[in-house]
Each structure stands twice: as C-alpha cells, then as structure tokens.
Amino acid sequence: EIVLTQSPGTLSLSPGERATLSCRASQSVSSSYLAWYQQKPGQAPRLLIYGASSRATGIPDRFSGSGSGTDFTLTISRLEPEDFAVYYCQQYGTSITFGPGTKVDIK
Amino acid sequence: QVQLQESGPGLVKPSETLSLTCTVSGGPISSYYWTWIRQSPGKGLEWIAYMYYSGNTNYNPSLKSRVTISVDTSKNQFSLKLSSVTAADTAIYYCARGATYWVYWGQGTLVTVSS
C-alpha cells in the first residue's frame, strides 16, 4: 500500500498569502496519478486537481498542483476567505489511498 | 446536474451487516463507475470499493473479505454491504461517481456501530 504523508499538519495564514501544501508518497506514484481535494466542515470533499496538475472543472486558477514520483505540491497563490479548509491528497496509481490532510486556518 | 444520495440505518450493532444504498439522479447509472468511500476521525478518508455499472468490481484489500457492492440499473441505485462490523467501522459513508477520482459525491451518511 502506498502511504501518503502530508505536511504541515496545520498551516496558519492570512487572506492574500500564498499557501504551499506538501504530499509525499512512500513509493513512486505511477503516471502522476495524484489528486487533491478541499473539504469544509459538514461537506463532502471537493475535487481540485487530478493527474497531479490538471485543475478540475470550475476550480479557480489560484489553485495549482505540481510534482511527480514521490513528491507533490498544492499551491494556492493568494488565499481567499473561502479557501480556509482541510486539503487532502489521494493517489490512484496503485490501489487508492488518501493522505491525512492539511488544515489551512486563519492566522 | 448529477446528484447522489446515501440512505440506510444510522445505527448498526456489532457483528451485524451494514447496508447502504446510493440513489443517483440527474443522469444514468449506466456507463459509469461508482464508488464507496468512508471517513472516520481515526482513519481519515478510506476508499472502500468501486464497481462498473455492468458488474466489474475492485475492492480495498483491507476490507475485501467483508464488502459486497452491487448496482441496480432499473432503480438507478448502487449498494454497499459491510459484514461483521465493529466500532472501527463507525464513519461517514460517501458514495461517488467514478473509479479513481471523484467530482460527484453524495452528502454522506453517518453510520455508528454500537450495541
């Protein structure tokens, strides 16, 4: 099983700042089959990125994904008030597993 | 707009079978894969299984021995059965459309395992 580790656990930032979230895999994720989700309390996760760097339909371009192999990054260029949430990475190259999440909260 | 809605008992006794149904509206169940995912405080998000509408299935190896999923195209529904449940199976259960990543999700239903 591929284990995903996300860091930091919590990221405290102000609106307008840049957020950089990391997702590291215990082994290489084939074909960059990695996705990112945003989840707010009481809601289902929302797909942001798939294929490591492709934005899902309707996702603002302030969200971007990068990386390959075992190291992936989600960047939010300028935080909007609605971006404060928990973010999960998920790999689908070898079975399917999720990371434990990074909480982005307001500083 | 595709919508998914989970339904089923919110409380299941230990050792019994958890049964949930996902009703799909706004689009056909055919020609797509359908997935069950759960989320608990202890284990986070966990993929359970997915199934193609015609019957091809893929299960999480850690749950495979206890899970059965099925599709009823006549009702535009798909179902999950998880047997021999324990407190560790307490979670919010989501259904979703797709096999590998998911745009469309249900709102989730909390299932508690307790006597």
Image: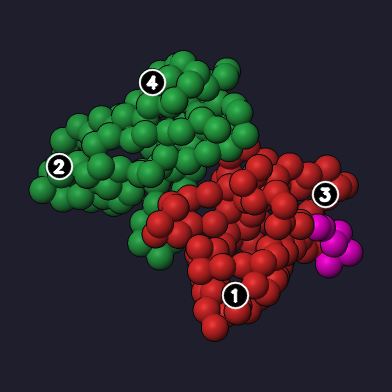
Chain colours: A green, B red
Q: Amino acid at mark 3?
A: Tyr
User: Taking the image as drawn, is residue B13 in sight?
Assistant: yes
Q: Amino acid at mark 4?
A: Asp
Residue at point 51%, 30% (across, down) = A2
In the image, which residues are magenta?
B70-75
Which residue is identified by label 2? A13
B59 left or right, relative to A19: right
Q: Position of residue B28 (x, y in %)?
A: 79, 54
Secondary structure category for the residue under label 1 = loop
Which residue is identified by label 4? A71
Chain of the residue under label 3: B
Q: Give the Cα distance between marks 1 and 3.
A: 30 Å
Dot 2 crowding, Cα within 10 Å, few <14, some 14–19, many 20+: some
User: In which quarter of the view is residue A13 placed?
Assistant: top left
Which residue is identified by label 1? B14
Which residue is identified by label 3? B53
Q: Position of residue A50 (x, y in %)?
A: 52, 31
Q: Amino acid at mark 1?
A: Pro
